[in-house]
Amino acid sequence: MQVQPRYNPLDPSPFFDDDRSARPAIPDTVARGHLHTDELLYTGKVNGALAETFPFPITRQDLQRGKERFNIYCSPCHGSLGDGQGMIVQRGFSAPPSYHIDRLRQAPPGHFFDVITNGYGRMYSYASRVNPEDRWRIVAYIRALQLSQSAGLEDVPAAERKKLEESKP
């Protein structure tokens, strides 16, 4: 059993009519675990257009996971506030755009997912490093960062606003 007849990859084989030992994939074959039928979840698009919504409801746990993934993969360049002043900028590399500029505040969530997935400009793709669900969680966290930097008192819920006003010196 220790020595079994086998073919090395791409060895010739007289067994098959085309003399190849490596068999071509059957058309439309999908590897186990790779059937991506949810266009929104896997591409960030709906009917080819960038998505305006998230593919699943975002919870507090999703935001916490998004923050964790953001701090690992994004903050070295984009900074912990999303202002484009990460560690690489301090080391002399060019700064990425701040998430707080109007163009990116108005961009749909699908834009950020697409950039994380495919890369953009000097940023390379993170598709092989970050799974699709975590990419969406990072996008949700980016939205939270954007809100945190441009929120006003009127954005605070009434009950919390009252507590803040009462605590003023």
Image (cartoon, rainbow, N blue to C red):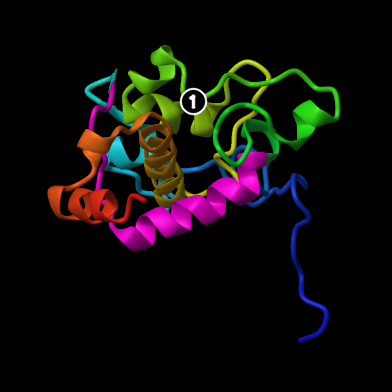
Number of marks in the image? 1
Residue 123 visible from this viewpoint: yes
According to the image, label 1 marks what residue?
Answer: 99
Work out which quarter of the rendered image holds the N terminus and state it.
bottom right
Examine the structure image and report whether residue 144 is included in the region drawn in magenta. Answer: no
Compared with 102, 90 (above or below) is below
**Residue farthest along the bottom direction in this orientation:** 1
At x 37% / y 57%, what residue is drawn? 62
Q: Position of residue 3 (x, y in %)?
A: 83, 79
Q: Position of residue 31 (x, y in %)?
A: 45, 52
* 41 on left or right of 154: right
**Residue farthest along the left direction in this orientation:** 158
User: In terms of depth relative to the viewer, which is nearer, 112 or 92?
Assistant: 92
* 123 on left or right of 66: right
User: In terms of depth relative to the viewer, which is nearer, 115 or 60?
Assistant: 60
* 166 on left or right of 158: right
User: In terms of depth relative to the viewer, which is nearer, 117 or 95?
Assistant: 95
At x 34% / y 44%, what residue is drawn? 36
* 37 on left or right of 116: left
Quarter of the rendering containing residue 110: top left
Q: For mark 1, give the secondary structure.
A: loop
Tell me which amino acid carries mark 1.
Answer: Tyr
Compared with 56, 46 (above or below) is above
At x 50% / y 26%, what residue is drawn? 115
**Magenta segment boundaries in residue numbering:** 50-75
**Residue farthest along the right direction in this orientation:** 91
Q: Position of residue 97 (x, y in %)?
A: 58, 19
Quarter of the rendering containing residue 20: top right
Residue 32 visible from this viewpoint: no
Examine the structure image and report whether residue 52 is included in the region drawn in magenta. Answer: yes
At x 61% / y 39%, what residue is drawn? 74
Question: For mark 1, does the 10 Å Cα neighbourhood hold few (<14), some (14 to 19), or many (20 or more) residues?
Answer: many
